Amino acid sequence: MALSWGRYFRESIPAKQISVGHETDLANTLSQCQLPMLPYGLGRSYGDSCLNSSGALIHSKFLNRVLSFDRQQGIIHAEAGCSLREVSELAIPSGFFLPVTPGTQFVTLGGAVANDVHGKNHHTRGCFGRHILEFRIWRSDRQEVVACSPTQNSELFQATIGGLGLTGFIVDLKLQLIKGSPWIDEEIIKFSGLKEYRQITEESDTEWEYTVSWVDCLKQSKDGPRGLFMRGKHSLSRGFEPSFVFPKSIASIPIEMPQFLLNQGSIAAFNFLYYNKQLSKMARRTVSYGPFFYPLDILEGWNKIYGKRGFFQVQFVVPTSEVEFLKDIFALIARSGDASFLAVLKDFGDLPSPGWMSFPVPGVTLALDFANKGKSTFELISRIYDLVLKAGGRVYPAKDAAMASEMFYKTYSQIDRFAKLIDPKFSSDFWRRVKK
Amino acid sequence: MVENRKNVVVFGATSKIVHESLKKMSLGDKRCHLFARNSAHLNSVARDLQSRFPESGIQEYRCDFQSSSDVEMACKTLEQLGKIDLIFLGFGSMLDENVLRDDTGIRDEFLKLNVSSVASLLMSARKTLLGQGSGTLCVITSVAGDRGRASNYLYGSTKAFTSTLLSGLWHELSGSQIKIIDVRPGITETPMTSHLKNGLLTTSASRVGAKIARSVESGRSRVVYTPGYWGLIMCIVRNLPDFVFKKLKF
């Protein structure tokens, strides 16, 4: 059984699991497979976009070789099963850094392309797809590996970025890295309400490479939640040294925790402590990239904290002008008492992605977790989605477990041209749930 | 100019565990001689190591360890290289036990690969290391060799063969500077074991590789279980009396 990160879709059991050890295996494995197929990296998608019930999951994790690394230009050519962690650990000693990284480094390159991941620097660098020079993808209808780039098989290139693994099996890709120190100069500023959040965002966006806010969803004022605004940039005074310690996990959650652990009381307590972890309004320090980008990776298997019933992550974006809708959503969440401690707010920039199905558009994005409490959780998510739709926003498929087909088609205008390029032998639980 | 860079020789370079181990070693500017059957796969491994160790000299040799002539070529190459720092052997196969039990032809080929070819290369390694009076021989066997079990005794017996050979070789060479390391991984996630169900005791090739790299670099232990807790598990398994063992179905 391969679960997704939310550990909710337990009845989704693939009929077959195929591991690809090398490109030369494709002819004996994928070509012969009669079941609908779906690539599976490290299983960090929260919902059902990485699941394929009764179909075949194609594991890419053994395809994790680096084929070349140009240390002058910062271009890495690697197999799609390489994790962002492996790429970072190779790039950093040569002065390079991932151009875009999500909140975990346990994502494969293929997964990063399929979800067109974004990070704290979306306003300066856009999505992951903007930094892909080319990739090679296996298609069942071609029975061969096809090279794609902005100028070669460009439609397949654009359909695959953000294409949720449905357009074929990515074998390898070339990624342009950025120059950057593994040390981040960080500032954390306390704010109360969305007006202050907006002010700090406008001050920060030109000067700071990375910005993101943690918000306390349980403590609301008329102006929205309080929170901590974090901004960072690569240190110019401190770089990589041979003694540099790469991030590692310090503990692991081996089994599912009992559900009573995460309740309104414990979350409110966590939020209080976290908001007040610094006494001053603003704190400055230089940190290693691990705690800045991947605070949750220190706890291996942290998703098991949500217990047997699992959890949902909801992420959406609404236009910046729709601040009243955003306040309504926050108020709804606060009233429900169902929020978690992991609520993240950020402004997206306007750098477009090449991917047709890429999620970020200019606006404000909020990502948060909800423990699965059954019907009430689904109702809450449904009401949030209604507000998102009314605000002219959209939901991130990589995290979704509940979006209706109608909403998906209304909010992703390129879906029809994307659907034409789905590999005829590829499918997923998500796609079967939402497609017309 | 005399080529005086150290040599690392790897038999079975496309094995996931072998590759993960090499990634974690300090290959630096050493010359790496990689032997494997699938040229395209071997090339990908070579490119990966070259990317990580740009100063290293990586050479690829296509070698089908089931072919006597290829194994002979590999032995000759080994004996003709300069000073060798490390000989690392990690090739082998795992087949359906029921097929191995019933099909003589398949079983003969399986034994040729996992026993006969292994013995030829280990004797060649012995000769080479004796000639230079130093160096490390590291071989990947398995916990399956510690005691025969109903579910996989043909596979296990080939690993037991290798472990006993290494034990004797260690005994023979124990007065010298030559180090012999018998690595016994537990259940590891690799393409070879992908048909097996992952359990609590399954570990990653990356973790196993890291331990192998540390063991080769320290050279302290003769037998290395990876992860380490398998040492305790197998000690118990080996010493269970027959009347208890026969009740266990695994």
Image: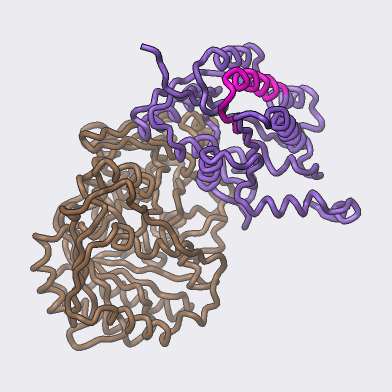
Chain colours: A brown, B purple
Q: Residue at x 19, y 73 (%)?
A: A283
- State which quarter of the image contains the N terminus of chain A: bottom right
Q: Residue at x 69, y 34 (%)?
A: B95
Q: Is residue A339 magenta?
A: no
In the displayed orientation, state which residue is furthest to the front.
B175
x, y percent for residue B170? 69, 32
Q: Is residue A280 left or right of residue A268?
A: left
Q: Is residue A425 left or right of residue A93?
A: right
Can residue B37 be seen here? Answer: yes
Can residue A35 be seen here? Answer: no
In the displayed orientation, state which residue is furthest to the right.
B243
x, y percent for residue A104? 36, 58
x, y percent for residue A406? 33, 64
Give the magenta range. Answer: B116-140
The total number of labels drawn is 0
Q: Is residue B218 above or below residue A123?
A: above
Q: Is residue A168 above or below residue A67?
A: below
Q: Is residue B222 above or below residue B131?
A: below
